[in-house]
Image (cartoon, coloured by chain):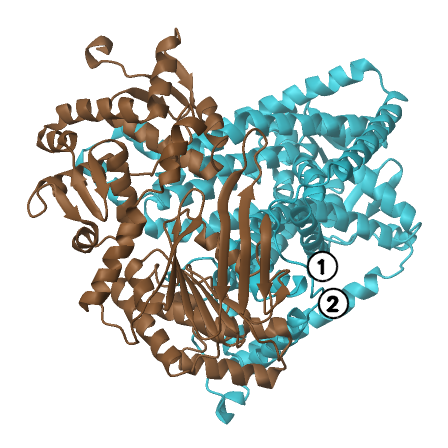
Chain colours: A cyan, B brown
Amino acid sequence: MTNYTPPALAGRRLPNRWDGVALLLVMGLLIGLVDVGRGTIATPIAAIQNTPIHLDPSYLPYYALRSTARMFAALFFSFTFTFTYATLAAKSRRAGMVLIPILDILQSVPILGFLTFTVTFFMALFPGQVMGAELAAVFVIFTSQAWNMAFSFYQALTTLPTDLQEVARSFRLSPWQKFWRLDVPFAMPGLIWNTMLSMSGGWFFVVASEAVTVGNTTFALPGIGSYVATALAQRNVAAIGYAIVAMLVVILLYDQLIFRPLVAWSGKFRFETTASVSAPEPWMLKLLRRTAVLRAIGDAVSAALEAVFRLRLGAGVRVQIDENREPSRIVDGVWFGVIALVAAYAGWRIVDFVAASLQWHDLGTAVLMGAYTMTRVIVLMSVAAVVWVPIGVWIGLRPGATRIAQPIAQFLAAFPANLLFPPVVIAIVYFHVNASIWLSPLMLIGTQWYVLFNVIAGAAAFPGDMKEAVANFRVRGWLWWRKVMIPGILPYFITGALTASGGAWNASIVAEVASWGNKKLVAQGLGAYIAQATNNGDTARVVLGVVVMSVFVIVFNRILWRPLYAYATRRTTLG
Amino acid sequence: MDQNYEGPLLTVRNCRQSYHKEASADLVVLDDVELTLEEGEIVGLLGRSGSGKSTLLRIVSGLLKPTAGEVKWRGKELRGPAEGVAMVFQSFALFPWLTVQENVELGLEALGVRKDEREERTEAAIDLIGLGGYDTAYPKELSGGMRQRVGLARALVVHPDLLLMDEPFSALDVLTAETLRTDLIDLWMDKKLPVKSILIVTHNIEEAVLLCDRILVFSSNPGRVAHELRVPFAHPRNRFDPAFRQLVDDIYGIMTRRAPKEVQAAPAAVPTGFATPLHPVGTNLMSGLIETLHNPPYDGRADLPALAAALQYEADELLPLGETLGMLGFAVLEEGDLILTETGRKFAESETEDRKVIFAAQLRAHVPLISAITTVINQRSNHRASAVRFRDELEDHMSPEYAEETLRTVIAWGRYAELFEYDEEAQQFGLEEEDDETS
């Protein structure tokens, strides 16, 4: 597919049908950008507090655009963060010692718990301006995207093929040239995949971060999330329906216009030596590649970028490896000392801050709440496994069904589950059932799809010759599950379950508390604990709740998921 | 660069490369290596894997700083990759996301060459090496031979004085490799290559004799220049010329000859006997070779070059096999011949179960690591022993990679001989359980 080069003939330069479509897309994008800019810059916060969110569906496209813009702003920051943070961690041994564990923890911290701090911080930075609220929202989305992207980039940097590194050094590429010629391209497939996962997760937080109450600061930024919040407050069922449809359209567009072309394009960077069977080209990529005008623009942009990549920034750095050079113990000692001091200071500040308003029994309460939420996560994960594993395997073993179901499952994973909460909440209010039990499924509504699409992928990747051998020996029934299929999909299932359970913890902050008009539903749990503390502006309890939840998640990962995953990959792969 | 410089392109004096080990003696990879490279010659570094020849190439290229010794490039001390040295890699090392043209251009970009000159030189290099028409192809669309041509073009485009080649043809099939060798020599003879000298690392004896004017034969553990010889034949050379064959035979002899020092030093220096890295040779391969040796036409004695040709093995593959048989007492290596011992003959004539008994006896007698493991298992009341302590002890004497490889080999051999079991999950050796005890 990369061989396709349209001849540069005069006829090709004439505008064609594709150009018309492309023109519409580009103009739409430009108008959208202008609109967003006008709404954001230096509008006093009073303005949005006075401009209520309209439930008229004609406002929805605008709100959707605002939400999407926030998403992409956050993505921009995520990429900046990824390129700098991960590079520093990979290139400097001393920095890596600190930065990587920090990243590991950040991944496990419930993002919505940050809201209290970020809102306070950014509001203080831009007092009385919309900018503060906007940045706070963008920051929450950023925190939901950046960590796994940085991790994926770091992992790529630490697994760069030795021979290509030697080429870069022996031909004396400057660090800047090496970064763009080797580091970034090598990391590209993993980075794109993680960006996609981040984006999927991000929609959830876009919706959650727009309408926020922290203590006595309340703001509702124009966007789909605020629209839903307003609809809930006004008990408007129809508006909730509109919002769900609008979100479906947005995700469909994002999937078709950006994500699919990007994944297809990143195939070019896959590090393999054999040509693989190429998947059909997404229509958007076709449009970009075959449209004369867009091609010309694309070529100009890539030529400009290439010129930047070729700059010999930092040339002349010594690149000879001296394997006998020992790292300086003194510098190491100083470094460790500084880290210890900073950590001690941070610990003292936290204790100081929390101790001012909390007693030991508060910790007990938080842990107990954590236990409730953990029970929910375990039960829900078991239910999800029992439901989705058989279905996923059934689909995965049938290529026809896989082709249809896999994109749908990925699509559903991207859909912000918090938009689906209201129907459940309405039902609970209507039937007067126990909120502590019936609010629970909300935690997994969004993340269960990770289990499904990973299981489908696992079953689809099950080797054909093994399937034939199993059929030949007529292995079936429970034996088939126990000895063949469950071990076969185990690594995939664990990958999915890990993502799903991490997401469920996070979602508990919005799922354990729900409201319908002035009716408030609360499920006992750590999520509700954090959510209520946030609402009350009780920063000490938020800190406590976030810390306890992080510890639960980290322990869960370390004790259960990581060993399980290591076991599964060790035992279920040959060689 | 000093244009008036007259003298050897490259000199290496007293070069030593070792890795520092905390607990024990340093691991020496290269010891006391001397090398001088003049303009207009092709020099080969020939040796087994692990003889440090690739390490020497990386030192010469400026990628690696030697622990001790002096490397001079055109009379000046070498500090890092120098202008005028370019390298061709065994794995081709092409960037999969760059086209042929972009891959070749890479070295020029790093030099900051202007666009029009860059394109001109790239085009010339691509044409010279026979890649015309492939400019816009990606590496994954090319065959192995074509990929290595790209690797060659990428090195030549910077017009290096010295071309370094790290086993450039060993990843290619026999016919493709031969075509590339011939093309390289033709260009060299026609003076079309923009290089003054070539240094080539290889483990293929015939390749070295075919290409080089001078060959340095390396011995292993630690890597030393065991022998240096000139190849007196004019290009193009004929592989079937009796003189050519004789030289190949002689080099086989040199490579199988044991360094006398090693034999003397072995018992004194390493009382535990742990220090010998084992070649990862499978038991099926050993059985197969013993049977082949036992059967006609060899009848217990085979000439190594002939055996290698018959089995389509390279010296580098056959020698570890032969040495392993030698170490276990199944065969003897003598001046380029492999001779089956009495034990080897008995093994060849036995059935599966008896073979295992013979193999177990040879392991106990000749592999100190195996006897150490069985001793520890038997001493313990639970009849289990952790593999970790053996790995740690091995790592005191060799690199972690070799330690891992040696341990894997011992596990495979011990399992075949039914001397012990190994539990991968727990990383533990255990006593082989008799079938009738468990059922």
Q: In the rendered image, which residue does mark 2 sit on?
A: A33
**Image quadrant containing the N terminus of chain B:** bottom right
Q: Residue at 37% across / 25% down in the picture? A: B369
Q: Position of residue B285 (x, y in %)?
A: 22, 40
- Point 26% across, 63% down: residue: B174
Give the farthest residue toward the left: B296
The mark total stands at 2
Q: Would residue A441 appear left or right of B385 to someone viewing this image?
A: right
Chain designation of label 2: A
Quarter of the image for residue A480 reads: top left
Identify the secondary structure beneath mark 2.
helix
Q: Amino acid under label 1?
A: Ala
Q: Which x, y percent locates residue A224?
A: 70, 51
Position of the C terminus of chain B, as image quadrant, is top left
Q: Residue at x 46, y 72 (%)?
A: B197
Examine the rendered structure and indicate whether residue A319 appears above or below residue A228: below
Measure the alpha-carbon separation of dots 2 and 1. 8 Å
The subunit carrying tag 1 is: A
